[in-house]
Image (spheres, rainbow, N blue to C red):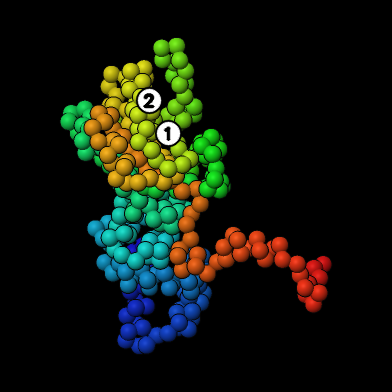
Amino acid sequence: MIALYLHIGTEILLRQKQNGWGSKVVARLSADLQAIFPGIKGFSTSNLKYMKSFAEKCPDGQIGQQAADQLPWFHIVVLITKLRSTEDREWYVRETLANGWSRAILEDKIKTEFRSRVGTAVSNFGEVAVRGGRVINAEILKDPYMFDFIGLANGAHERQIEDGLIGHLTQFLLELGTGFAFVGQQFKLIIGGDEFFIDLLLYHYRLKCFVVVELKAGEFKPEHVGQLNFYLNAVDARLRATDDNPTIGLLLCKSKNKLVAEYSISGIRSPVGIAEYQLVRQLPERFGAQLPTTHQIESEMSAKPSKSTKYPVVR
């Protein structure tokens, strides 16, 4: 089917170039194809236009170095309509094939600029080796993490965010990335008779290690690393199996000073990453500049309407 669509798109491009075909001719072609092949779907005018775009952007049936026919058609439509560069398309093809993303997940990953966030968290992974002298791939972390799916405002408390993430566990794990499995929330450790609670405990089945996630509702502070490192040492001592790699720590905060974060984890023996999270997806600047501020909205709502104001009647 993909080969057929590529052929049709190539023919449309060729005829438009040689014979000056316009959009009306494409609509007529769509009607003719549907009349000749009534039992076959996919010959709508919009789909023919997608075929043309496919032939324009992937003339050899390849998306970068990846064969396009490895994907369903509407995955390809998303890639050619939502992304501009071949490099981006190829990267998302690889990730889709590796992780089995549905079209909805692929669209969401593109919308949240997933590629630009991967591997950008502050970490000491380059300094800390695991079994066999291997270095942990920094791409397992990203910055920032997008938690807008839990429906909380920016002023939410840590426990509210934590509960929201567990309430949307599937989306939370998808945002974290491939390989993460949930172990527990407020996971209790008893050490020397004292009780301690880890915000979120995960396990990465590809890296074979536990992952401790600590949430901070405010700005990153150096002392947060001390608390996280304590949890990492405790998990390694109490839960880590003999064939597990050292536990990884992920500190998620509302904001951070990158240089302060880098200094804070320098010299820490356990693998630690620090990243921000966003509860509300940011509007593009060109839109935000055109919207009224909260103060302006409140002023308008509190203003008394003039006597001449007429309101429509809604029935």
Q: Residue 141 or 251: which is nearer the viewer?
A: 251
Q: Determine if residue 176 is in view.
A: no
User: Which quadrant of the view contains residue 311?
Assistant: bottom right
Q: Is residue 297 left or right of residue 145?
A: right
Picture residue at 45% right of the left edge, 54% below the top: 108
In the rendered view, tell whether residue 158 sits above or below residue 279.
Answer: above
Q: In this view, does 103 lie to the left or right of 302?
A: left
Picture residue at 36% right of the left edge, 17% below the top: 238
In the rendered view, tell whether residue 97 sits above or below residue 201.
Answer: below
Q: What amino acid type is highlighted by mark number 1?
A: Glu
**Which percent across, then down, holds residue 294?**
59, 59
Q: Is residue 245 left or right of residue 190?
A: left
In the rendered view, tell whether residue 40 sits above or below residue 203.
Answer: below
Q: Residue 53 or 60: which is nearer the viewer?
A: 53
- Label 2 neighbourhood size at 10 Å, few (<14), some (14-19), many (20+)? many
Q: Residue 287 or 136: which is nearer the viewer?
A: 287
**Which percent across, then down, holds residue 237?**
33, 18
Q: Residue 108 or 223: which is nearer the viewer?
A: 223
- Mark 1 highlights which residue? 214
Cα distance between the residues tagged 1 and 2:
10 Å
How many marks can you see? 2
Q: What amino acid type is highlighted by mark number 2?
A: Tyr
**Which percent across, then down, holds residue 231?**
38, 25
Q: Residue 105 carries which label?
A: none
- Mark 2 highlights which residue? 231
User: In the rendered structure, which disc, 1 or 2, sits on the residue that comes first in sequence?
Assistant: 1
